[in-house]
Image (tube, grey):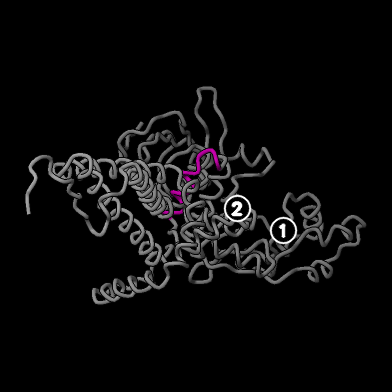
Amino acid sequence: MSITHGEPPPVAGPELEGIPSDIPPELLLGVLLALILLSAFFSGSETSLISLNRYRLKHLARNGHHGAERALALLERPDRLIGLILLGNNFVNILASSLATVLAVQLLGDAGIAIGAGILTVVVLVFAEVAPKTLAALHPERFAFPASFVLSLLMRVTWPLVWALNAISNTLLRLLGVRPGEGGMQPLSREELRSVVNEGGALIPQRHQQMLLSILDLEKVTVEDIMIPRNEIVGIDLEQDWDDIIKQLATTQHTRLPIFRSDIDNVVGLLHVRNLLGPLRRGELSREHLMEVIREPYFIPEATPLNHQLMQFQQQRRRIGLVVNEYGDIRGLVTLDDILEEIVGEFTTDPASRSRILVPQGDGTYLVDGATSIRELNRLLEWQLPTAGAKTLNGLITEYLESIPEPGTSILLRGYPVEIVQVSGNTVKTARIDPTFQPRSPNEVREA
């Protein structure tokens, strides 16, 4: 045998991981690009599905949106969804790495292995990870809904393999005390729901936002906070002369009135004035007729939250109730309208009732009735006076000073200036406030 010197015969390149080395580079490059696109699809799908707003997703699904229905079905078992996506993503990434190595060796020889690995790392990070995940996070619905169709098909095709992978991983998690099936969407707390409403922005008008927040706050407020005080209850005393009772019924501004004997503690019942309009107009009203239409009194514990009382009014078909303390003494009166005003704001059209609360003065200040509730004052002036203790301005002033003030006394009440104008008996009848004053340090008291 003779050996011919000259050009050595061509040597076939290495075959890596079962991939023939004689595949044309153009074909390898095309397949590699396709694999990178598949990797980007799996990466973006994972981020978009996890980023979906679950509450909006449920809303769309209930309205028949097919993409939302598919996405919601996939998210019901996140362990299976993640298993499918990682299975597909790792498969295409490993195959892409092998093809890139073969392509690099064909083009650059053995030195191309390191170069190809570096280039592929950058390409995968930028085009198959960072870019698609960022896009999916910014527009999750645009990405997730079409992707859910493909993922649903892949889930059916690869179900045995996905099930096997989940069985192994879930077993490991159970050994660590984690139950994968207990995941899912957690309900929103009250404060989280408040944040959702506040972040509604232009989607929810400001007026509606305030109403929703007021509904959330009903549980924090009791009937004691909004009741009409005992000394302001307007009712009918059966011990009065009958002509005076007729006159009061004919001129009253209230549609419902408590009926009592001598004192509100001796309440007989509650009257709907509408039931007496006919006999009253004809002049045929008698005490017997009045007693026939009186409804038994309805008593409410003073610590009852407003949300509970609102439901009680609905169930009992009532609109008015008498507030009692733990000893059974009547403390005040609360109506359905009072609770509704906590939600929608004051809707009375009686200008006298508002002027009783805030009387504007020429210097920009207001005269305020001492019986005004702290909650009402905070709402009208956007102040932050405490509501945990005293319920009225008079109560807050006397509680703060620990004495009955003299007229002309000026104080900084939690940083807000208040001047006592009139004192009647042991209560502050009228006070002057400046709504434009910016509060300073609280708990300062200055005698005028």
Residue 367 on image: x %, y %: 52, 34
Q: Write the start and end of the magenta stretch as one range.
A: 191-203
Nearest the viewer among 295 and 401 is 295
Nearest the viewer among 114 and 25 is 25
Can you tell which mark lies on residue 232? 2
Quarter the N terminus occupies:
bottom left
Residue lying furthest right in this view?
Answer: 282
Q: Nearer the viewer, mark 1 or mark 2?
A: 1
Identify residue for label 1.
256
Residue 10 on image: x %, y %: 18, 46
The quarter holding residue 20 reads bottom left
Structural distance between the alpha carbons of marks 1 and 2: 14 Å
Q: Can residue 376 be seen in this snapshot?
A: yes
Asked whether residue 53 is drawn in magenta, I would say no
User: Which amino acid is tagged 2?
Assistant: Glu
Nearest the viewer among 360 and 386 is 386
Magenta stretch, overall SS: helix
Residue 309 on image: x %, y %: 57, 64
Nearest the viewer among 402 and 359 is 359
Q: Can residue 427 be seen in this snapshot?
A: no
Compared to 282, does 392 lie above or below? above
Residue 91 on image: x %, y %: 32, 58
Q: Residues within 10 Å of mark 1 (few under 14, many from 20)?
A: some
Dot 1 lies on which element? strand
User: Which amino acid is tagged 1?
Assistant: Arg
